[in-house]
Image (tube, rainbow, N blue to C red):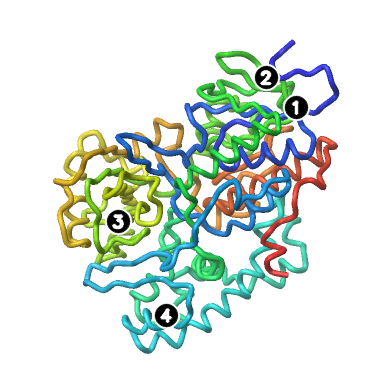
Amino acid sequence: MMRGQRSTDARRVVVIGAGPGGLAAAMLARAAGAEVTVLERAAKVGGRTASIEQDGYVFDTGPTFFLYPEILREIFAATGRDLDVEVPMVRLDPMYRLKFENGQDFDASADIERLKAEVARIDPADAAGVEPYFADNLRKFEAFRPILQKPFLGLGAFADRDMVRSLPMLRPWATVDRDLARWFRNPLVRLAFSFQSKYLGMSPFKCPSLFTILAHIEYAHGVWHPIGGCNAIPRAMARVLDEMGVEVRLSEPVEEMLFAGRRATGVRTAQGTYAADAVVVNADFAHSMKRMVPNALRRRWTDERIDAKSYSCSTYMLYLGLDTKIDGLAHHTICLSRDYERNIREIEDGKAPAEPSIYVQNASVSDPTLAPPGHSALYVLVPVGNLRGGVDWAALAPSYREMVLDRLALFVGRDIRSHIRSERMLTPQDWEATGIHLGATFNLAHNLGQMLHLRPRNRFEDLDGVYLTGGGTHPGSGLPTIFESARIATKLLAEDLGLDAGRVPQSAMAEAAE
C-alpha cells in the first residue's frame, strides 16, 4: 500500500508546499472532508513567508505587510477557529512612512484629514483629490471583486453581466500612474499612492490601472502586523492543521508527480510515494512544473511557453540585528529614489539599480518579541532585476551591500554599520536556489497578457486532478490574493471530488462589498 492510502473511501489530497496558499488549501480541503497531507521541501513552514531566527533576532524572510485579513478570517472560521485568537495582530497607524530623497516625509494614515494634510505638505492643490480618489477606488474595488473571487477557466468567465459592466471602470488601457493623474498632478503624490505596485513586483508606469485599488485596500481596511511577524500566520495554520489531523511533512521535497495518462495519481518523494485523488501545487509555478511534470504532458504550459513568459523583479535582502534603536524609522519605511523612473527602468532591464529605492521594516518598534530590549531587527529590501539580466551576484553582493548601507544612512541620517550584531544576506541567486524561477520573488508578472484566464488556472488546464494556488496563478501575488486563490482552488477541488463544498466559504471580498 502506498503512503497516503486509506482503507476508507475518503478522498485523498496531497498539497505540495507549506506556503500560505498551500496551508490554506489544506485547511479548507480537510474541512470539506478530505484526507490531506502537506509536503514541504524546507525545514519550516511558510514558503516565502518563512522567518529567520538568529542571535536573538527574528526576521520575516518575505512578506511583511498583512492586508485585508477578512479573507483569512473566513478560512479560519471554516475550520471552527478565530484568526484573531490564533494570530494576535495590531493595526498600524501610520501605516507606513515614505521618505523622499529630497528630504520630504509622508506618513500614510487611514484618518482622512491627517492624510489630506500630509498630501498638502507636498502639494496643497492635490489635497482636494484625496476624497474623489477614494470614492472612485471604492467603486473600482466593488467592480473588481468579481475578478478576484471567481475562477477564470476560460473566456466564458467574461460573459458574466457584472464583468461586462465593470470593465470600463477598470480602465485596462491606462497604467496606475496615468490613472492617478486624474486626481494628483504632483509626481511625488502619485508615487505615494502607486508604489504599492511593487507588491506585485511591477512598475506603476506599466502596471494596469486597476491596481490603484491596492492603496485603497490599505486605507480602507488597514495595514496589520501579526505579533511575531508574518510567519506567525503559517505557524498558526500548521498548528490548526495538526489539530485537524493533517500531517505537514517538512524537509521532504516532492521529486515528481505521478500520472495515469494526464491524470495525477500521486507524488513521489525520497521518503516514499503518496497516492492522491487530487494534487494542489503551492510551489513556484515555473520551477515546479519544469521539475515535477514531464514536458510532454503539458500542452499549454510547456517549458518553452514558461520560459517565454514575463517575470517580476527580484529582491536583494539584508536582515540586520542592531544593538540600538533607530529614530526616524517607522514600522514600515519606504525610501524613494530621487530618480524613481530611472530606478524602475534599471530593474526592468534586469540590473541592480545604482541609486535604488529601499524598503525597511523596523518591526521591533511595534513588536518587542523580534529583538532583545533596546535592539532593532531591520529588514532591508531593494527591488532589483531578476536573473534574466545576467548580473553576477556572487561578485557584486559585497560592494552592493556597502552601497545599500550608504543609501540607508542618507535616508535615516546615521550610519548603522557599527551597530550591526547579526546579519544575513539574500540575493536573486539565493532566491533561485530556494526554488523560485529566475529569483523572481513576485512570480509571473501582472501585465494584461498574464492575468485572468491568461494566467495558469486554479483548476490547472494542462492536467487532470491538479489545482494551483499561490502567486503564480489567478488572482496573483500578495497574501490576500494568495489566500483567495486557495479558496477558489479548493472550492473547485471539493466540487470535483464530491466533497462538502459548502464548507469552503464564499469570498470575504464579496461580503465586504455588499
User: Marks 3 and 4, Cα distance to the nearest angstrom?
Assistant: 25 Å
Q: Which residue is mark 3?
A: 358
CA separation in Å, label 4 and label 1: 53 Å
Choose the circle earlier in sequence order: 4 or 1: 1
Q: CA distance from mark 2 to mark 3?
A: 44 Å
Three-letter amino acid code at the position of disc 4: Arg
Disc number for residue 274? 2
State whether residue 52 appears in this view: yes
The amino acid on which the numbered mark 1 sits, given as a three-letter code, is Arg
Classify 259 as above or below 72.
Answer: above
Pointer 4 and pointer 2: residues touching (CB < 8 Å)?
Answer: no
Q: Residue under circle 1? A: 12
Kind of residue sitting beneath label 2? Tyr
Q: Is residue 328 left or right of residue 505?
A: left
Judge by depth and name the residue closer to the eye, 207 or 488: 488
Question: Circles 2 and 1: CB distance less than 8 Å?
Answer: yes
